Image (cartoon, rainbow, N blue to C red):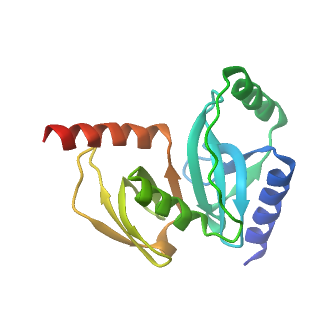
Amino acid sequence: MNNATKYAAYQLRNLMNEGLIASIFTDPNNPDDFIAGYVLAVNQRTTLVHSLTPFGKPDGFFAIRLNAILEIQHDSAYAERLSLLLRLTGQNHPMPQVRDEDDGLVYLLGMASRQGKAATLWTASESYSGFVTQVNDLFLQMEPVDFLGRRCAPMSFRVADIEMVSLGSEEERMFELLEDYHRKNG
């Protein structure tokens, strides 16, 4: 683990232990884009985050490889607003039972596979949304969906090539609805 990765893990653990909302930046092409949420777990390779929309609603979970993180911030005013919105709307989201030693990426991908839920994964150059059919510590197989939510030919990925995974976000829920429609209506 290099120094930048160690420092990211240190920052994330502090935010997790304090129960504070993190702002995690991962996109070098869009420096204003970040993932806001509560840190649920951190290990030497990954972190698991309960994501929130800018409007204070739960938006699924992100598993992020630590070496894909560019910057971590905590904006106390923004975090206070999100926390207040969560309380005011009574929004709650079931928290996965994850251990710090679990690989967050494999954990979320396995959860998607077991529950038949859509997931999005990012590699260094592309993103893919679809349904995970098999996953282990080394490889995964996914049936990606097209723009209209129809399943495409299966694809295989090396887990080591995946930088980030999302499960349960508004986008994934949209693809689940579309795929269900196409499955039922041919």
Residue found at x 81% / y 59%: 13
Q: Is residue 6 above or below residue 90?
A: below
Residue found at x 76% / y 25%: 84
Q: Is residue 78 above or below residue 105?
A: above
Where's residue 89, x and y in %?
66, 22
Left or right: residue 88 versus residue 52 is right
Residue found at x 27% / y 41%: 180
Left or right: residue 42 versus residue 185 is right
Quadrant assignment, res 113: bottom left
Left or right: residue 125 versus residue 96 is left
Left or right: residue 80 versus residue 37 is right
Residue found at x 15% / y 37%: 185
Where's residue 121, x and y in %?
45, 58
Farthest residue, direction top: 88
The answer, for residue 148, to whether it is visible in the render is no
The answer, for residue 56, to whether it is visible in the render is yes
Q: Which quadrant of the figure contains the N terminus?
A: bottom right
Where's residue 25, x and y in %?
65, 51
Residue toward you, 37 or 101: 101
Quadrant assignment, res 156: bottom left
